[in-house]
Image: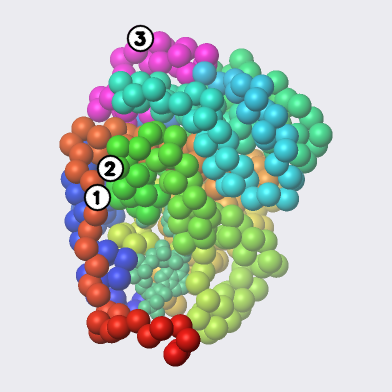
Amino acid sequence: MTDKKLSGAGLRGQSAGETALCTVGKSGSGLTYCGYDVADLAEKATFEEVAYLLFNGELPTLDQLETYKAQLHTLRDIPQSLKEVLQHIPADTHPMDVMRTGCSFLGNIEPEADFSTQHQAANRLLAAFPAIMCYWYRYSHDGVEIDCTTDEASLAGHFLKLLRGTAPSEQHRRVMDVSLILYAEHEFNASTFTARVCASTLSDMFSCVTGAIGTLRGPLHGGANEAAMDMIQTFTSPADAKIQMAGMLERKEKIMGFGHAIYRTSDPRNVIIKKWSEKLAQEHGDTALYDISVACEEFMWDNKKLFCNADFFHASAYHFMGIPTKLFTPIFVCSRLTGWAAHVMEQRSNNRIIRPSADYVGAEPRVVTPISER
Ligand SMILES: CC(=O)SCCNC(=O)CCNC(=O)[C@H](O)C(C)(C)COP(=O)(O)OP(=O)(O)OC[C@H]1O[C@@H](n2cnc3c(N)ncnc32)[C@H](O)[C@@H]1OP(=O)(O)O
Ligand SMILES: O=C([O-])CC(=O)C(=O)O
């Protein structure tokens, strides 16, 4: 891996503010939410507990969790006017653009009245995002107008049932829940920083989240899980994967799902989703794609000392669950909404407009030549 200066481009290595929500790579490779290790949360908690933690600073008691889940349950359906907007979005639209529009339109019809209702706005988006994604997907791809309510207890199960129309298996519910936990929060990543910059102007929650969705869309950020899937599907075997990847590195192409701006040796989310991907491959009865993914991981470490980030094994895990590739990054949105909204609330609690300076490298002062003389 090329040595890069940590300062300079991309604000790398510079602190851009304080947060009590998350640490990334603090002990070399760790990830914590409000002091809890993400591996601990992924093993012992549910996504709703993590959402509650990020929005309130503490894990809920059983009573608090039941009340919170019941509240989210009432917020899952989407208004008819939003359904009509979604019906107008063509099937070949990128689903991240659908999420962006869905979020923005919800902000038109249910605006955040003032900051005292910020929890309500965040919970509304959290509960409604699966319906926005699945209503559009099923309508535009299958011509079906789905019922946006389900009897699924968790948002993970709710999403899978909306997508498929049938109840998911316990294993699929659990993997989706773990995935939502892993993607929930990640300090000052690009999309969260976008949300905070927007919040710092005292803008509304829906604008902050809409901007964050646009930032997550790019392949260097959340879009990498889809790009990784597209790549591994072109490999015919582990040996072929290594040959193709050598060619990509030779051509100086970026390999999606590898590397990280902060972690240096590993992404702690990878080992967790990789384990689930392996289990799903066995359940699926076809481990070829998993074996190819492992070969990619070995090749990149051996040749570039680059490791899988959270996105790489999410690709095969989601694929084994039958999730269409184009919905991978929108699922990330359903999860990261919790981190974005928590950061918006944190920014508002101690706000100063975010406005850094730039080092000017342009032309020296000069006078305007009249257009007739240029
Ligand atoms: C959930 C998430 O958002 S995780 C990130 C998802 N994104 C991806 O997987 C996209 C692929 N990865 C990348 O593009 C990068 O690793 C990023 C964007 C994640 C981080 O970028 P940076 O902080 O600039 O990476 P870093 O400073 O470690 O890069 C060092 C060198 O390794 C190279 N490198 C880093 N990642 C990769 C990669 N995936 N494939 C090939 N080369 C890479 C860089 O090109 C750089 O070399 P250069 O000086 O010749 O440009
Ligand atoms: O932190 C980053 O730069 C990207 C990332 O892994 C995330 O947002 O989950």
Q: Which residue is mark 3?
A: 63
Instruction: Let me know if residue 67 is in the magenta part.
Output: yes
Find the distance from the CA under tag 1 to the CA under tag 3. 38 Å
Q: Is residue 267 above or below residue 349?
A: below
In primary-sequence order, the first of circles 1 and 3 is: 3
Q: Contact (CB < 8 A) between labels 1 and 2?
A: yes
Q: Which quarter of the image is occupied by the N terminus?
A: bottom left
Mark 1: give few (<14), some (14-19) or many (20+) Cα within 10 Å.
some
Q: Amino acid at mark 1?
A: Ile
Q: x%, y% of residue 107?
A: 49, 31
Q: Which residues are magenta?
A: 51-74
Nearest the eye: 274 or 35 = 35
**In-image side of 80 versus 42 (left or right):** right
Relative vertical location of residue 160 with respect to residue 372 in this rendering, above or below = above
Instruction: Please tell me whether mark 3 sits on a helix, a strand or a loop.
Output: helix
- The mark found on residue 354 in the picture is 1
Q: Is residue 120 visible?
A: yes
